[in-house]
Image (spheres, rainbow, N blue to C red):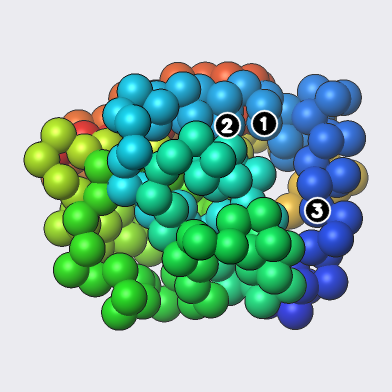
Amino acid sequence: MLNKQGFDLWANDYDKTVQLSEESNTYPFAGYKKVLGTIFNEVMQTPGSNVLDIGFGTGILTQKLYENGHHMDGIDFSAKMIEIARKKMPAANLIEFDFAMGLPVEVKGQKYDYIISTYALHHLTDERKLEFIKDLLPLLKVGAKVFIGDISFQTRADLEECKQESIAYWDDDEYYFVADEFMHSLNGIVQCEYYSMSHCGGVFILSI
């Protein structure tokens, strides 16, 4: 798994790497455009909404929402990726912070129409993902939603099948979503739906 320095070094080539994987329909970014497009279309249902983007990277999705009049706060731990994103969104509130440590003080007490995260939360263990989701809930306005687009599988068997097919470049240091297990862990905490977008990617929609 890349650390902060690794993501800083990868920043300039990140978008190209994603594009190559997405176009060849291979792990880890197969379905990437469909994932981001789905979340974009959902957020666009509320004009001028307040949005928090967790792990926004180079700002591909964040920029599109910003350009369409949404008020963007973002958290990322890569100074280089923030530098790239800030050039695209000079008025966005982009915060350098490692979300593995929780949430920065700048967003605590804020209220959002949408919280989004794409291809970021797989860096958290399954247990930490659940804790992090709980931390997000107080930030939601009434009727607000959380959208998580990420490397994910419907079942553990689906994950193992993809792992064997991609064993030469599989990342054992990342913790991919298994929808059946993740949704079960959220029972009684938040409502959750899952929509598969490819053999290794999908979108979770969380609502209170």
Question: Which callout, 3 or 1, points at the residue further toward the start of the chain?
Answer: 3
> Disc 3 versus disc 2: distance between alpha carbons?
16 Å
| Crowd band around label 3 with a 10 angstrom C-alpha radius: few (<14), some (14–19), many (20+) | some
Q: Secondary structure at mark 1?
A: helix
Task: Check contact, mark 2 vs mark 1: CB within 8 A.
Answer: yes
Q: Which of the 4 image quadrants contains residue 166?
A: top right
User: Label 1 neighbourhood size at 10 Å, few (<14), some (14-19), many (20+)?
Assistant: many
25 lies above or below 207: above
Q: Nearer the viewer, residue 116 or 111?
A: 111
Query: Which residue shows up at 58% across the image and 62% down it?
Result: 90
In the figure, residue 43 lies in which quadrant? top left
- Of the residues shown, which amino acid type is indicated by label 2? Leu
Q: Amino acid at mark 3?
A: Tyr
Q: Are marks 3 and 2 in contact (CB under 8 Å)?
A: no
- Are there few (<14), some (14-19), or many (20+) residues within 10 Å of tag 2? many
The label on residue 36 is 2
Residue occupied by mark 1: 32
Q: What residue does disc 3 label?
A: 14
Question: In x, y percent, where is residue 99?
Answer: 45, 69
* Residue 118 can be seen, yes or no: no
- In this view, the residue in front, 151 or 205, is 205
Type of amino acid under label 1: Tyr
Q: Residue at x 79, y 63 (%)?
A: 11
Does residue 173 appear left or right of residue 207 in this picture?
right
* Residue at screen point 45% across, 66% down: 93
Q: CA distance from mark 2 to mark 1?
A: 6 Å
Residue sitting nearer the eye, 176 or 103: 103
Where does the image place residue 49, in percent across and percent down from the top left? Answer: 31, 40
Label 3 element class: helix
Which residue is drawn at the image coordinates 73% and 39% (left, top)? 28
Residue 45: which numbered mark, if any? none
Q: Is residue 52 visible?
A: yes
